[in-house]
Image (tube, rainbow, N blue to C red):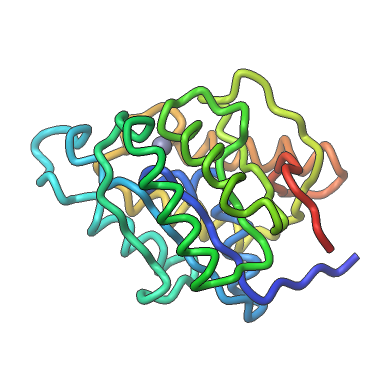
Amino acid sequence: MNLQFAKILVLAPHTDDGEFGCGGTISKFAGTGTEIYYAAFSLAEESVPPPYPKNILETEVKAATKVLGIKPDHLLLYKYQVRHFATHRQSILEDLVKLNLDLAPDLVLMPSLHDLHQDHSTVAMEGLRAFKKTSILGYEMPWNNLNFSTQSFIKLTKPDIDKKTRALECYESQSAKIYASKEFIISLARTRGAQIGVQFAETFEVIRWIF
Ligand SMILES: [Zn+2]
């Protein structure tokens, strides 16, 4: 089956989540002419480690999304306070409803409904509310997923994985995290590829499927 989407919207609670969860898939579809929008809901200024400037994630997400082939004006940044999304649930939902009206994507990529991070969980739940009439796939973040159902896979090429690791290398301020290791990113893509008999893949939970 050769799927083609006109417009994909990636929901990233924090700036690097989309690259981690579905960077290879973004690269794949950006290369086929699909319009890709990336909405990040926090610049996580309170989590930036010293000596980096508090707004470093804004600089890093611009560089990372460019590597993946996302146009600068398709990067949408919101400034919710990291770890406090639940307090602003309704406001986030209203932003998502507006995104749906403005963009009308035919596929939404967002955190899994089984993601334990409180901000990821809010974006997943409100994302489902806002985009219930749209196909939605939940991306994998093994360090946050209590469990994950590998229901669907997107096959990737070596250049897609190279772009994913290069995009993540733009996040110098996050490089100390264990899961930021290039070896880990490639190994996970190889693991998911091996499940379906190809070299590289990303896996997704099917949250809504409308075709
Ligand atoms: Zn996050």
Q: Residue at x 47, y 55 (%)?
A: 96
Q: Residue at x 71, y 71 (%)?
A: 5
- Name the quadrant containing residue 64: bottom left
What x and y, as percent, mark residue 2?
85, 69
Above or below, 30 relative to 200:
below
Task: In the displayed orientation, state which residue is furthest to the bottom.
Answer: 33
Please state if 77 lies on the left or on the right of 108 as rendered. left
Q: Residue at x 30, y 54 (%)?
A: 78
Please state if 149 lies on the left or on the right of 112 as rendered. right
Ligand 1 quadrant in view? top left
What x and y, as percent, mark residue 91?
36, 47
Judge by depth and name the residue closer to the eye, 154 or 183.
Answer: 154
Number of marks in the rendered image:
0
What x and y, as percent, mark residue 191?
72, 35
Task: In the displayed orientation, state which residue is furthest to the right.
Answer: 1
Above or below, 23 relative to 32:
above
Quadrant showing the N terminus: bottom right
What x and y, as percent, mark residue 211?
84, 63
Q: Residue at x 60, y 66 (%)?
A: 8
